[in-house]
């Protein structure tokens, strides 16, 4: 399904770019994904219901997603007609990835034992901008008591682990190899 989601995301991004709506649609997708996150099983039921006619699916989209930009609404109509509404979160992720790539930015998740201040996050962000060569990092701080201390940073598929838990795991592996 990831390939299908990526095609929808790319098509939506291309239309959004032509109409200078890439930011607006990203924000709308953010809101829609938050809204439907707990309703995915309901969307799958709609997708798999053969009794729902095309016009009923379109009415559903018009009612539920009222007020979104025209390119996004058209994409949602297309998803409804093709029984793919449950792909909204994956399409959002694909769209965000394209957006981030075009704008040389990415999401950076910083795990720590306690909530970090904005100043601490800014310093960490600056260090990783230098390290990654990206222009911008969107910072998100998550508390993770299991780290014991230090931080673990995830940017895309890369993980930089400077936690005490990681250090302990490395020590444990070293001792096991000595046996």
Image: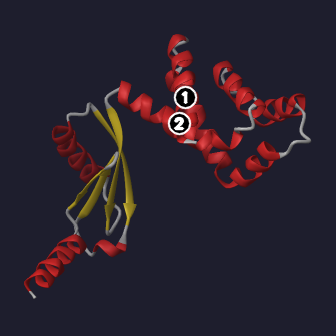
Say if 141 sits above or below 13 in the image.
Answer: below
The quadrant in which the N terminus is found is top right
Above or below, 160 against 108 in this view is below
Q: Quadrant of the C terminus?
A: bottom left
Under circle 1, the secondary element is: helix
Residue 105: name its quadrant.
Answer: top left
As helix, strand or loop, the secondary structure at mark 2 comes to: helix
Q: Are marks 2 and 1 in contact (CB under 8 Å)?
A: yes
Is 157 situated left or right of 47 in this image?
A: left
Residue at (36%, 29%) from the top-left corner?
Answer: 101
- Place of residue 171 in the rendered image (x, y in percent of width and height, measured from the top left): 14, 78
Q: Which numbered circle lies on residue 78?
A: none
Residue topped by disc 2? 3
- Asked whether, in this view, residue 111 is left or right of residue 2, the answer is left
Q: Residue at x 31, y 29 (%)?
A: 104
Q: CA distance from mark 2 to mark 1?
A: 6 Å
Q: Which residue is mark 1?
A: 7
């Amino acid at each position: 399904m990831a390939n299908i989601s990526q095609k929808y995301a790319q098509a939506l991004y291309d239309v959004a770019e032509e109409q200078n709506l890439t930011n607006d649609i990203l924000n709308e997708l953010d809101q829609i994904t938050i809204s439907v996150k707990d309703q995915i099983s309901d969307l799958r039921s709609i997708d798999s219901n053969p009794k729902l006619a095309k016009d009923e699916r379109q009415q559903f989209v018009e009612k539920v997603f009222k007020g979104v930009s025209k390119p996004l609404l058209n994409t949602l109509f297309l998803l409804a007609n093709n029984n793919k509404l449950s792909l909204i979160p994956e399409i959002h992720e694909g769209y965000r990835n394209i957006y981030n790539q075009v704008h040389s930015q990415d999401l950076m998740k910083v795990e720590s034992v306690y909530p970090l201040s904005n100043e601490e996050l800014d310093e960490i962000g600056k260090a990783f901008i230098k390290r990654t060569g990206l222009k911008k990092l969107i910072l998100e701080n998550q508390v993770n008591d299991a780290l014991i201390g230090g931080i673990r940073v995830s940017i895309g598929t890369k993980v930089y682990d400077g936690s005490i838990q990681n250090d302990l795991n490395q020590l444990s592996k070293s001792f096991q190899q000595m046996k």
